[in-house]
Image: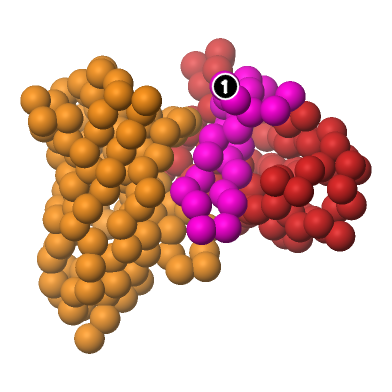
Chain colours: A orange, B red
């Protein structure tokens, strides 16, 4: 069974940093593109970043470029999102998703709240 | 960025009746002359999104056959042939052809 478990969310002040992790199991992690998708409270979905199988190709939505970094460790079956210079508008549930063009498996999400 | 315009925003439906959700993209979603990366997701209250349809019209494993996807180019439709109580939630279309991949704003299906 495919499973992805996110962790690392929490309350952070504007300008602060957080590192999200996603532990994947039930599939060959190193064979798939992976994504981070976020959902602000009561709002829709936004693709934030994605990464190819070996980590050599990364894409970011404009609103997070230069502040967020996606990475992966295939030996640990793990996906990461380093988030710096956080803003109030980054407040959201962050989901780890398998594949990027048409994400088929999603984690349960981790809530990031940016507030003073 | 590709804008995905969904309608209606709210969809009250009587149990057993059909439902239809429209999604229009601001650009063609045909990728390399072959695949159309248009997916549909269902998000039940308090849950993560669940993919229902991928590549325009392919139903995911475990998705009831009352759900179907169709369309081409820039105009797409999700149909539910007979709505059941478990179908309540928000439905999103998503394009995976042009980065950044983008979602529609959602259609909230409720039982009348």
Report x, y in % for residue A73. Answer: 11, 32
Residue that appears at 45% across and 41% down:
B101
Image quadrant in which you'd find residue B110: bottom right
Residue B46 appears in the picture as rendered: yes
Near mark 1 (Cα within 10 A), the count class, few <14, some 14-19 or many ≥20, is few
Magenta region: which residues? B38-65
Observer-nearest residue: A54 or B26?
A: A54
Q: Is residue B9 left or right of residue A82?
A: right
Residue that appears at 87% across and 48% down:
B15
Report x, y in % for residue B46. Answer: 51, 58
| A8 vs B26: above or below | below
* Quadrant, the C terminus of chain B: bottom right
The residue where tag 1 is placed is B61
Observer-nearest residue: A18 or B3?
A: A18
Observer-nearest residue: B96 or B48?
A: B48
Number of labelled discs? 1
Image quadrant in which you'd find residue A4: top left
| A89 vs A29: above or below | below
Q: Is residue A93 left or right of residue A76?
A: right
Residue A70 appears in the picture as rendered: no
* Label 1: element kind: loop
Residue that appears at 43% across and 65% down:
A40
Residue that appears at 60% across and 44% down:
B42
Residue B7 covered by magenta stretch = no
């Amino acid at each position: 069974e495919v499973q992805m478990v996110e962790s690392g969310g929490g309350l952070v002040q504007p300008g602060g940093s957080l590192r999200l992790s996603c532990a994947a199991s039930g599939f060959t992690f190193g064979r798939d593109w992976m994504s981070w998708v976020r959902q602000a409270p009561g709002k829709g979905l936004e693709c934030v970043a994605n990464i190819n199988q070996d980590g050599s190709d990364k894409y970011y939505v404009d609103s997070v470029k230069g502040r967020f970094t996606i990475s992966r460790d295939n030996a640990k079956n793990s996906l990461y999102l380093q988030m710096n210079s956080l803003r109030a508008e980054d407040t959201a549930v962050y989901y780890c998703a398998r594949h990027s063009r048409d994400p088929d498996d999603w984690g349960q999400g981790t809530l990031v709240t940016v507030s003073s | 960025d590709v804008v995905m315009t969904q309608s209606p925003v709210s969809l009250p439906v009587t149990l057993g009746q059909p439902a239809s959700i429209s999604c229009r993209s601001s650009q063609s979603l045909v990728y390399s002359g072959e695949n159309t990366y248009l997916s549909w997701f269902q998000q039940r209250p308090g849950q993560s999104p669940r993919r229902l349809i991928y590549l325009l019209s392919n139903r995911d494993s475990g998705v009831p056959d009352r759900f179907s996807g169709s369309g081409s180019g820039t105009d797409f439709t999700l149909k539910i042939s007979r709505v059941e109580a478990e179908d309540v939630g928000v439905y999103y279309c998503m394009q995976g052809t042009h980065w950044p991949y983008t979602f529609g704003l959602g259609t909230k299906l409720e039982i009348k």
